[in-house]
Image (cartoon, rainbow, N blue to C red):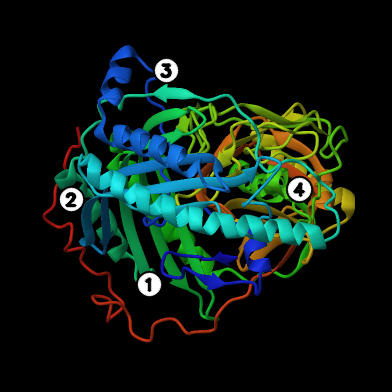
């Protein structure tokens, strides 16, 4: 597993060996452009006759269908014919602007097209994909842009040939290994039989991306950080994407699903005197750039980020602690995504290298009775905020479904792809993947609700009451979270680590709250989830990007604030490099620098 704390520190290895691949890591800060699946913004539901007519004349879709039919016929004559074959083609147009200190670092517009060829050889009961660690099952490559059907078909042919030559030897290895290894506990098939789907959706007219206006705004926003000498790195990025995913399979499915997404990320970093790097990130997501906050709102966020970093530099380092804690709604949402959500993903119940925390707990109480959890990709908005994990069809062409995973504390279901598990034989529309990887059961929009609530304004007082009840000097309030990860393999402890940004000590004797830094929430799921005492009465949303076995996918988590009778925290590891030796330009004499980047600029009005 890899994790990072800022866009400048990606790929930092946290664990060794194959356990690296068994962990689920979530990155809620910066979406990597390359290979990133696009968040789906719902368009017009249903396929009109006009859409069907337009897609029927789509040269790319025509080339996919023709080559699929040819490959199915010809490979059907082989000794080991594929029983399942699908082509998925992703078209993506994107604009990326990155600014720092009043200037542009990146101004890029691009277009790309690539394809996944997914193939299963053998039988649904056992095929070449058997076993999570096997790479066989999908081959990927770039496709020609434009509408040259012959060129597109040629690349699909090459990818199909490549995957078939990998799939047949993999099937033989599967059969050999099965014959010499002990019998598996879960003897479910490798692939479920599902009804073919047809959904040919025409892309709605998208609001144009005003590149010139946004270049000006990115310069002004990033230039605002020049006022703060203790902000050692800062950037503002906007990424506007338009996508069209086409899928056809030899089962008869045909899916055309366009989507749009715009993501704005503001990042600032400083360093304390002891060498601890401190990070503040604000992210915003909408179907188009017009749905993002106004420039005035974003400027106010920048001022708050700088104030937070200044306070964190001076804050004391927190000590290890075990006691009452209050998580804000955003913090609780991340907590549930990490601690609970990953352990409800279907494939983890079958793989015998997984910890299988909840595999045999269906029908049992796993949360306090006042809590219920659903995962609903079909919900696109809550409390006026768009959800990043929304989609209409999953990566295997199955309709997204609302899944009630926990009802009144009792486990009811898992998040299923087309890989069956014991007692759960069908997909419920949660097979998701980053292009180039095999889909697995993944979270979309994980939504936690409660019937035991208190007004948000009273939650801090309830924390103080619990602190006094336990005879502790203080409790902890977690205001904001940057992300986290969880370990799900049985080869390592079944533990999680959530990474807070803003944490306060809340004293029982009436002293003012004290900001602290350098603390991570740690623990094990079965113990932590049973210690929730009550919740707030308002849902809060955290949009982000989650990485696991099937790659990075956009997700959302929704939860109210939560009071825990007990949470454990530990000191965060950090480097010991000193802050910069010289002051930033313009602050040599300790005086404020002139913000020349914005001196003559006037805000541009976006349509």
Which residue is at the far top?
A: 49
Task: Estimate the x, y position of residue 36 in percent, counting from the top left.
Answer: 42, 51
Q: Residues within 10 Å of mark 3 (few under 14, many from 20)?
A: few
CA gap, disc 3 and disc 4 = 35 Å
What is the secondary structure assignment of the residue under circle 3? loop
Give the number of the mark in front: 3 or 1.
3
For label 2, the residue is 216
Up/down of 549 relative to 315, above or below: above
For label 3, the residue is 46
**Mark found first going from the N terminus, 2 or 1:** 2
Give the number of the mark in front: 2 or 4.
4
Viewport quadrant of the N terminus: bottom right
CA gap, disc 2 and disc 4 = 52 Å
CA gap, disc 2 and disc 1 = 23 Å
**Mark found first going from the N terminus, 3 or 4:** 3
Please tell me in which quadrant of the rendered image residue 402 appears. top right
**Mark found first going from the N terminus, 3 or 2:** 3
Q: Nearer the viewer, residue 533 or 366?
A: 366
Q: Which mark is residue 350?
A: 4
Question: Could you tell me if residue 216 is visible in this image?
Answer: yes
Please tell me in which quadrant of the rendered image residue 365 appears. top right
Task: Estimate the x, y position of residue 188 in percent, counting from the top left.
Answer: 76, 41
Q: Which mark is residue 232?
A: 1
């Amino acid at each position: 597993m890899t994790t990072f704390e800022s866009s400048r520190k990606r790929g930092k290895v946290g664990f060794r060996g194959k356990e690296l691949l068994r962990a689920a890591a979530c990155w809620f800060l910066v979406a990597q452009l390359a290979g990133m699946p696009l968040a789906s913004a719902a368009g017009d539901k249903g396929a009109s006759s006009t859409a069907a007519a337009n897609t029927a004349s789509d040269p790319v879709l025509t080339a996919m269908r023709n080559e699929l039919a040819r490959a199915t016929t010809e490979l059907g004559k082989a000794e080991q014919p594929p029983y399942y074959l699908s082509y998925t083609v992703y078209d993506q147009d994107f604009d990326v602007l990155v600014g720092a200190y009043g200037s542009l670092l990146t101004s890029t517009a691009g277009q790309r097209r690539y394809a996944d060829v997914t193939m299963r050889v053998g039988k649904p009961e056992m095929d070449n994909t058997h076993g999570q660690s096997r790479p066989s099952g999908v081959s990927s490559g770039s496709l020609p842009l434009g509408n040259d059907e012959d060129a597109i078909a040629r690349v699909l042919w090459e990818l199909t040939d490549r995957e078939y030559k990998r799939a047949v030897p993999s099937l033989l290895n599967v059969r050999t290994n099965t014959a010499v290894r002990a019998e598996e506990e879960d003897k479910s098939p490798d692939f479920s039989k599902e009804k073919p789907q047809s959904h040919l959706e025409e892309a709605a007219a998208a609001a144009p991306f005003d590149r010139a206006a946004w270049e000006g705004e990115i310069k002004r926003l990033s230039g605002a950080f020049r006022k703060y000498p203790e902000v050692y790195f800062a950037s503002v990025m906007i990424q506007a994407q338009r996508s069209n995913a086409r899928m056809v399979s030899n089962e008869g499915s045909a899916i055309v699903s366009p989507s749009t997404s715009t993501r704005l990320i503001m990042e600032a970093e400083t360093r304390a005197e002891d060498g601890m790097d401190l990070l503040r990130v604000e992210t915003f997501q909408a179907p188009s750039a017009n749905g993002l906050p106004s420039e005035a709102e974003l400027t106010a966020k920048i001022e708050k980020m700088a104030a937070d970093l200044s306070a964190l530099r001076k804050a004391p380092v927190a000590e290890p602690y075990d006691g009452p804690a209050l998580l804000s709604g955003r913090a609780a949402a991340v907590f549930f995504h990490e601690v609970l959500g990953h352990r409800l993903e279907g494939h983890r119940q079958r793989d015998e290298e997984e910890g299988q925390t909840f595999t045999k707990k269906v029908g049992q109480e796993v949360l306090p009775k006042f809590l219920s959890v659903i995962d609903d990709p079909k919900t696109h908005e809550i409390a006026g905020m768009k959800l990043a994990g929304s989609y209409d069809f999953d990566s295997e062409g199955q309709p997204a479904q609302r899944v009630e995973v926990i009802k009144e504390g009792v486990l009811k279901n898992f998040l299923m792809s087309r890989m069956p598990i014991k007692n759960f034989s069908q997909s419920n529309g949660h097979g998701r993947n980053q292009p180039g990887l095999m889909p697995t059961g993944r979270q979309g929009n994980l939504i936690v609700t409660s019937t035991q609530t208190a007004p948000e304004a009273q939650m801090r007082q309830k924390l103080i009451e619990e602190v006094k009840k336990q005879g502790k000097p203080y409790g902890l309030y977690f205001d904001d979270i940057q992300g986290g990860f969880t370990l799900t393999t049985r080869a390592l402890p079944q533990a999680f680590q959530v990474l807070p940004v803003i944490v306060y000590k809340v004293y029982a004797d009436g002293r003012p709250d004290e900001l602290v830094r350098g603390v991570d929430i740690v623990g094990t799921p079965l113990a932590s989830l049973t210690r929730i005492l009550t919740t707030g009465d308002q849902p809060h949303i955290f949009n982000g990007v989650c990485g696991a076995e099937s790659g990075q996918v956009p997700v959302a988590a929704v939860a109210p604030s939560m009071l825990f009778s007990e949470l454990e925290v530990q000191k965060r590891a950090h480097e010991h490099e000193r802050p910069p030796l010289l002051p930033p330009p313009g602050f040599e004499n300790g005086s404020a620098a002139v913000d020349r980047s914005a001196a003559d600029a006037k805000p541009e009005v976006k349509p």
